[in-house]
Image (spheres, helix red, strand yellow):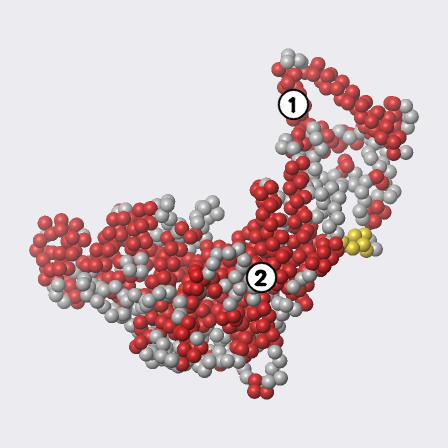
Amino acid sequence: MTTFRRRVAEWRFPFLRRAALWVPQWFDKVAVLDAPLEAAMAFPHLQQPSFLLASLKADCINKPFAQRCQDLVKVIEDFPAKELHTIFPWLVESIFGSLDGILVGWNLRCLQGRVNPLEYSIAMEFLDPGGPMMKLVYKLQAEDYKFDFPVSYLPGPVKASIQERVLPDSPLYHNKVQFPPPGGLGLNLALNPFEYYIFFFALSLITQKPLPVSLHVRTSDCAYFILVDRYLSWFLPTEGSVPPPLSSSPGGASASPAPRTPAMSFASYGLHHTSLLKRHISHQTSVNADPASHEIWRSETLLQVFVEMWLHHYSLELYQKMQSPHAKESFTPTEEHVLVVRLLLKHLHAFANSLKPEQASPSAHSHATSPLEEFKRAAVPRFVQQKLYLFLQHCFGHWPLDASFRAVLEMWLSYLQPWRYAPEKQAQSSDSQPRCVSEKWAPFVQENLLMYTKLFVAFLNRALRTDLVSPKNALMVFRVAKVFAQPNLAEMIQKGEQLFLEPELGIPHRQHRIFTAPTLTGSFLSPWPPVVTDASFKVKSHVYSLEGQDCKYTPMFGPEVRTLVLRLAQLITQAKQTAKSISDQCVESPAGSSFLSWLGFSPMDTNCSYPANDLDEMGQDSVRKTDEYLEKALEYLRQIFRLSEAQLTQLTLALGTTQDENGKKQLPDCIVGEDGLILTPLGRYQIINGLRRFEIEYQGDSELQPIRSYEITCLVRALFRLSSAINHRFAGQMVALCSRNDFLGSFCRYHLTEPVLANRHLLSPVGRRQAAGQARGPRLSLRFLGSYRTLLSLLLAFFVAYLFRVGPLLCTLLLVLGYILYAMAMTVLTERGKLHQL
């Protein structure tokens, strides 16, 4: 063995071979030392693990990525576990990055095959479930090595529970918490190699910094996303059994390394954790596990780690605290995070649905089944449901009101439709009609009632606050309405609500039952609890386990939610009309109108009719899509809640859909009060989202209005002082000129007086009373000379005159003469307009 180690060391570290040329006797002493202790004492600086780790660290700087991976493969094959375990923590961190997010490692979240094909293929081959890295994991697993993982990097609820010396409900942490020694720096988990590797792999999605917005990376093409898919397919197979660990010796077969910590019964995990179930960390009792469970311990560990690291960031207590408007968010998921969770949910549905019909039936629970079959049956309800519900509740309540919510929405809809991932779906015909949801999915709907009903109400509240004119937002409303409108789904949801609302007093044998989870005892393969045939009890247990015993349930098909649906129907109708109005407005506006307005040659609308919208960028095709999405969404809502055509017609009329000038002059929804118009909640929504607006005009002294962005501040103020001095000096003469009844009087009135305030649109009675006594005499205003537009126009005129050999003086005379002619024409037109009004 010593000769083998020396030969490997010489091949792996060429500098040792070169050193042996001039110090042969010294190196031979190292080679003949058989006892490790003697070697460490005689030559502590030549310990093989330290050489190995130091050389690998140096390779990270000096060698390219491909060469480093080749060397790692040879090291894993040639070195024993005793020497590999010292490099394992460093290697895991160098691949997935540090837990504090400072080191990015191989940056798997940005590594794509089409961008870096060589690095991508090498990394995927190395980290594959059957690749060299997993061989290293199994090699160390067989020797029962443990690695410390700091509790401070665990999700918030788990970290808080352990720090309070309370054992978390997940069996993943049982018998792993290590108290710090005297002078230690905190609590740690003692993990086996497989757990340590999966912990780092899962947490790298959370701990690493979010990708910059400027970096356009498609998550589904990244190495990390594809590795998650491969690990799920390998350890949670939909066909066959979990492949055994790879052999650590050439040509030999190795048995599956058994976990050194006992597993827990599926029936005792994942439900609401009452105070009676809290146990002190010091009492981490062992549970005798059946050896048959060892064949899927890796599958169980993988799923528990993924769920804990990706979903367990909110507890029921924390969720209830987050309902306060003053609560601060403890964890904010990213869009990439949500996409990976959706991949997990889709695979779990396929994994659970891969049970054969005879295995999936309730009667199969009482017969002998394999651990994998038990795991498939328990994976979603016991491991995922509660944590996913709290995760979705937080996302629905705190995610920004923008199009990025689509990722959360699709994750939610994927969970609500397990039938999409059932094997029999492939045999169905592909027709345009929505398929009826089979009655066999009624238990799933009932046991996930809150996922359907309460989250649907949360989505309604979001939709009522978003701009439905945007095609992306309209698409989200359409997607939700289409899913819930699947034939027979609404009936199953309504049946589940009836079971939950069924009064307890009417059935004596159910009066005193408590809806709590079973105790955390029993072995991995302990018998399943008796099948609960009482559907009402199962639904109540589900609701109370997720919301607590004191929850207040709002029925999805009750009057409160129906009112929200009717409001959404109103807004859908309004959004369709607004989209058409914006489209017509864009068609009518000439391409160069904004530039001419800036120069002052055409009127400039300082009060824009509508804010920026997706329609401005996508054009007529976007209007068509928006109208199509909203039209279908309205039809689906009518089917789900059985709305009649007469109701929708009445809503449309009540909304005031009769518009003038394509809706540009329609006022927001409001009522008339003593002091004028008062906005309704619908009117506030319309203003916030740009659906309607008031025609707001400045009606004060035009000389005192705020300085605009297109004006020069210092010049405006100087011109105001100059015009004020002129007006004060020649006030009497200007009044006399404007009082004349001839053309000169009309000419002076055109330039020296403002339009009468009474002719303006005064929408508020308060404003009318304030302006009643205001009467301003003739005055000169020079503020127009402080505008960038005016100065640029004059500069352009002088530049054109210069090109035609016209001097500045002559150019000025021509400009004055031209303006006088323009003013005379406008004076005549103005006087004729006044005579016509009389």
Viewer-side residue, 703 vs 742:
742
Residue 179 percent across, percent down from the top left: 37, 72
Question: In this rendering, does residue 837 appear at all?
Answer: yes
Name the quadrant of the N terminus: bottom left
Q: Is residue 718 left or right of residue 399?
A: right
> Mark 2: which amino acid?
Ala
Q: Secondary structure at mark 2?
A: loop
Q: Earlier in the sequence, mark 2 or mark 1?
A: 2
Q: Nearer the viewer, mark 2 or mark 1?
A: 2
The residue that disc 2 covers is 485
What residue is disc 1 on?
795
User: Few, some or many C-alpha atoms within 10 Å of disc 2 (few <14, some 14-19, many ≥20)?
Assistant: many
Residue depicted at 63% across the width and 32% down the height: 591
Residue occupying image coordinates x 58% and y 47%: 625
In contact (CB < 8 Å): disc 2 and disc 1: no
Between marks 2 and 1, how big is the CA–CA gap?
65 Å
**Residue 417 % position (x, y):** 50, 63
* Residue 404 placement, left or right of 651: left
Mark 1 belongs to which amino acid? Leu
The picture quadrant where one finds residue 821 is top right
The residue at 86%/26% (across/down) is: 746
Using residue 661 as the reference point, say whether residue 36 is left or right of it.
left
Residue 479 lies in what quarter of the image? bottom right
Q: Residue furthest top?
A: 805
Q: Crowding at label 1, few (<14), some or many (≥20) Cα neighbours within 10 Å?
A: few
Horizontal and vertical percent for residue 32? 10, 62
Q: Which SS class for mark 1? A: helix
- Residue displayed at 10% across by 49% down: 21
Dividing the picture into quadrants, the one containing residue 455 is bottom right
